Amino acid sequence: MQSVRCRKFIGLLLAAWACVPSNRLEAAQDRGDTPPAAGIPAYPPNFDPGQEAPGGAWTPVPEPDPYPDGPEASRFLLGDDFPFRSLREGTGFSFYTSFTQFEQGVASGGLRDGARWGGKFDMLAHLDTEGAGLWRGGMLDLFAESRLGQSIEGFSGSLSPANLAMYFPVPDAQVTAITGLKFTQEITDRAGLFFGKLNALNGDRERFLKYPLTSRFWNAAFNFNLALDRYPYSAPGAGFYYVPERGPSLAFLALDSYDSPRTTGLEKLFRNGAFLYAEAKQKTEFFGLPGKHTLATLWGTGAFADLAPASFIDLPQGAVPAPKRRGTWTVLWNMEQRLFVDPAIPDRGVGLYVQTGLGDGNPNPTRWFLSVALCGNVPIAGREGDTAGLGYYNLGLSQQAKDILPGLRDEPGGELFYNLRLAPGCHLTPDLQFVRPGFTPIRDALILGLRLKADF
């Protein structure tokens, strides 16, 4: 079965390569960047080349695309031939899809050796009310995702999911779900309100196009601050944002404490309290290089048990029950700093990304969290569309959790990836991870992966 999956995967790679005309590929490599597609605003340069450390599910003002060959630069595999592309002009409606395949396996250590194939089909529909001729400042985003195949979370034994994209909508089923449905209304040019079913990672066009889970690091520790382990991936909520001309941008939201990716979430709305999230985000210009600092806090009013299932970490199943405790809090600080900017192409560069967080330790199983990563464009002539990343993380569990389940320990790990552009809108990503799982009997795991993504 393993050899059959490998042959299928290699065949798909060859098919993807063969379907791209050679002159189109060479032109894309020489060009390095293209003007934005019709109907998409041309954002200014000089911003993050690599990744964002997502916080709350709010809608910021438009910012430049950190990937020079990202979808906003009209880098779609099918270009303007895709049927829905023609609807973008004059209607305010845009539609984006991507299909990603993963072949990932535990080469040694973990709970067991083995590989699994999985796939994700992501779809986002965006409506701009002003573009549709209705009213100014309204935006509606609908995000749906399909999970196919299997992941290796039962093999690696790590607390931090080795493939966060395959962890949602649910980690152990083949399912299609609408995990984001958000309406945003600008009140002024710098402030707005939003409400709906909020997706913490890919719920609106800004996040879906600029920071997709299938275009950078695989491990959850480099895609989300794991101190927010109980933050719902998909839940009903509402909030507001304010982006002043000077000073930090501010955001606040309240959302249900139940994670409800496959339902509306309304049937249990606020039965176990709510999560209140607030953040301040400040852009910087140290040594003439752009950066960003985010200080945020999360407060939960519900009652939780220390080892109860969490949204963003894979806790051991069948753990000893712990008494529930009402109220939980988390404080976090994320930093992004460009270390190098290509003077010829300001969009290109390398950045340093740091995520830190501190939790209450009871009922939050995470006491502290740290991740440090270097990510950005590779300095190779002719490979302007390629990106790479190297990162280290350490997930510190609370003493309460360790006392309840002997054998639990802090979990360090690292990851290295190279995102190779095969063609506009088509990327192949080899990935290597090394993790010391957060449970004593489990051996250190070496995890290898190959990802193929196509944006349509």
Image (cartoon, helix red, strand yellow):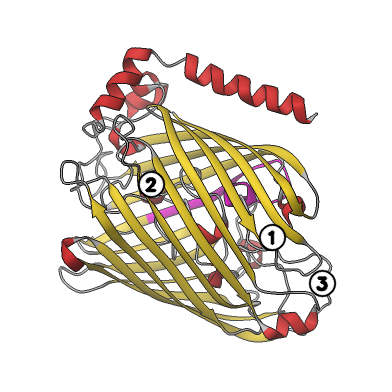
| Left or right placement of residue 329 versus residue 290 in this view | right
| Residue 119 % position (x, y) | 62, 36
Q: Is residue 393 magenta?
A: no
Residue 319 has which mark?
Answer: 3
Q: Tell me which segment is drawn in magenta.
A: 164-183
Which x, y percent locates residue 4? 75, 24
Q: Nearer the viewer, mark 3 or mark 1?
A: 1
- In space, the residues marked 1 and 2 are separated at their CA atoms by 31 Å
Q: Amino acid at mark 3?
A: Ala
- Residue 173 location in percent, x, y? 73, 45
- Asked if 154 appears above or below 336 in the picture, the reply is above
Q: Which residue is mark 2?
A: 205
At label 1, which amino acid type do we have? Ser
| Residue type marked 2 | Arg
Residue appearing at x 57%, y 64% in the figure: 232
Count residues near mark 2 (Cα–Cα under 10 Å), then give few for <14, some for 14-19, many for 20+. many
Q: Residue at x 32, y 24 (%)?
A: 86
The answer to which of 251 and 383 lies nearer the viewer is 383
Separation of residues labelled 3 and 2 (CA atoms): 38 Å
Cβ atoms under marks 3 and 1 closer than 8 Å = no
